[in-house]
Image (spheres, grey):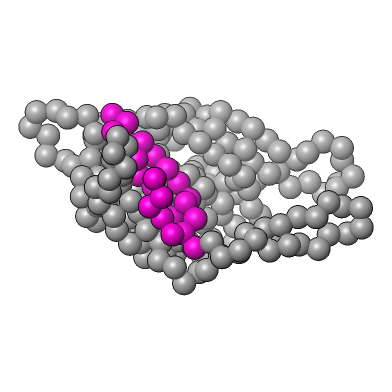
Amino acid sequence: MQRHAGEVRALEFSLDCQSLVSVSGSGFVRMERIRMPEGVPAMARPTYDDNSTPTIVNTEVATGAIQWQANLAALPLALALDRSSQIVIKGMIRPPQLAVALHNQDVVVLNLNDGSILKTFSSRYGKSTIRTSSMAFGDGPGKPLWTVGTRYTADAENRTVTSVSAWDVVRGKRVATAEVRGQIVSSGWNAWGTQLATIRHIDTTALSQKRLPWSFHLWDIKIGRTK
C-alpha cells in the first residue's frame, strides 16, 4: 500500500485489525550528503518539501482500499486510537475516536468511521513550548486523553522537563499534569493507556562521564489526588 506522498509519521491498527490509520508530513525530496570530519564515515540525511500537505488516511487492510482520507492543518507529531470506543455496545452513541497531535500545538480528535473532526483544542502550556512525543486514550468512557511532550520552563535556568498531561476531550481542557526532569527521547503506551514507557535525556555538566545520560522508566499512569 502506498497512500502518502509525504513521510509517514505514525501508524495505528484499529482494535479489530481490519483498518490501518496512517499520518504523513512533508514530502521526500532527496538524500543529502553530510561532510564529516576526517576518519568519520560519511553520512546522508533526507531532505523534505515542507510545501506538501500533511494527510491522514484510513485504509482497509485486506484490500488496501482507502476508506477515507483528510488533510491536516499542520505536520503530525503523534497519533492515538481510542480502543475502548471501538468496542460496540448496544445503545452506545459515541463514535470511535482517534487523536492527532500537530506541530502547531493543536490536538485534533476525529471520528474513526469517516474522518470528520469532533474536537480541536490547544496543548499549549503557559509561556513554554510543548512538543508532543506520544499520546494515548485512557481506558473506558470518559477517561482522559494523555499527552507526553517536552516543555521548557520559564525560570532563569530554562530547564527541560518531560510533561505528561491528561485532557478532558469533550471540554478540550487540561485536567492534570505531572512533570519529571529531562527531555523526552522516546515514549510508548500499552493498548489501554494505563502504562507508559519513557526514555529521557538527563542533562549532565560533566561531559567526560563514561556513561550515557539516559534514563528509562516504566510508569503506571492514573490521575490521583493530592493531600
- Please give the name of the residue rendered at 34% of the width and 40% of the height, measured from the top-left corner: 20
Depth check: 89 or 174 in front? Answer: 89
- Please give the name of the residue rendered at 52% of the width and 29% of the height, measured from the top-left corner: 219
Quadrant of res 69:
bottom left
Residue 214 left/right relative to 225: right
Residue 179 vs 42, above or below: the answer is above
Q: Is residue 185 magenta?
A: no
| Quadrant holding the C terminus | top left
Farthest-out residue, right: 38
- Please give the name of the residue rendered at 68% of the width and 63% of the height, measured from the top-left corner: 32
Residue 180 left/right relative to 95: right
Residue 50 left/right relative to 3: right
Residue 16 vs 28, above or below: the answer is above
Residue 184 left/right relative to 26: right
**Which residue range is magenta in the image?**
1-27
Depth check: 177 or 9 in front? Answer: 9
Depth check: 95 or 164 in front? Answer: 95
In the image, residue 177 lies at what x, y percent?
Answer: 46, 45
- Please give the name of the residue rendered at 66% of the width and 55% of the height, measured from the top-left corner: 159
Residue 191 visible here: yes
Farthest-out residue, bottom: 51
In the image, residue 133 lies at what x, y percent?
Answer: 51, 47
In the image, residue 5 lies at what x, y percent?
Answer: 44, 59
